[in-house]
């Protein structure tokens, strides 16, 4: 089954405190976010995720969205995360093929 066929019925959530403080600001811990996304995609899609990359400078601001990229079964995808609160809990709110990598 192709990636796009599997994404229609997915409910993905990554809810974990993913914050790191430094230089007076709190940012998303990109390494933790990448690991959580990989686990979530592999379980939800029953697919092999070979890489996930998130930006390392995302400030924790409730309601803010940002994109990460992933390789799912050899297909590049864009994973959109939404920061839920000041504790840096995030949720996957978008998943689309073709990340432009």
Image (cartoon, rainbow, N blue to C red):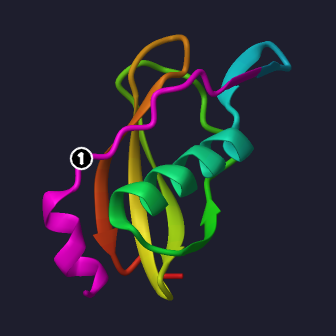
In reply to whether residue 78 is colored magenta, the answer given is no
Picture layout, residue 69 above or below residue 37: below
User: Residue 45: x, y in percent?
Assistant: 35, 65
Picture layout, residue 44 above or below residue 12: below
**Which residue is depicted at the point 52% across and 75% down?**
48
Element class at badge 1: loop
Quadrant where the N terminus is found in the figure: bottom left
In the picture of the structure, the residue carrying the numbered disc 1 is 11
User: Residue 54: x, y in percent?
Assistant: 61, 53
User: Residue 90: x, y in percent?
Assistant: 45, 30
In reply to whether residue 16 is colored magenta, the answer given is yes
Query: Which one is in front, 84 or 63?
Result: 84
Quadrant where the C terminus is found in the figure: bottom right
**Which residue is depicted at the point 48% across and 20% down?**
61
**Which residue is depicted at the point 41% across and 43% down?**
81
Please give left or right for residue 6 compared with residue 63 in the image.
left
Point out the stretch of residues depicted in magenta. 1-20
| Extreme residue toward the right, this view | 23
Q: Quadrant of residue 62?
A: top left
Please give left or right for residue 85 compared with residue 7 in the image.
right
User: Residue 86: x, y in percent?
Assistant: 51, 11
Picture layout, residue 10 above or below residue 91: below
Q: Quadrant of residue 28?
A: top right
Query: Which one is in front, 26 or 97?
Result: 97
């Amino acid at each position: 089954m192709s990636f796009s066929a599997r994404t229609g019925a997915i409910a993905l959530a990554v809810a974990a405190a993913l914050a790191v403080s430094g230089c007076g600001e709190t940012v998303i811990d990109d390494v933790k976010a990448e690991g959580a996304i990989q686990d979530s995609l592999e379980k939800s899609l029953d697919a092999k995720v070979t890489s996930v990359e998130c930006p390392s400078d995302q400030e924790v601001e409730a309601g803010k969205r940002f994109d990460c990229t992933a390789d799912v079964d050899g297909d590049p995808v864009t994973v959109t995360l939404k920061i839920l609160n000041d504790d840096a809990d995030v949720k996957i709110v978008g998943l689309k093929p073709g990340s432009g990598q």
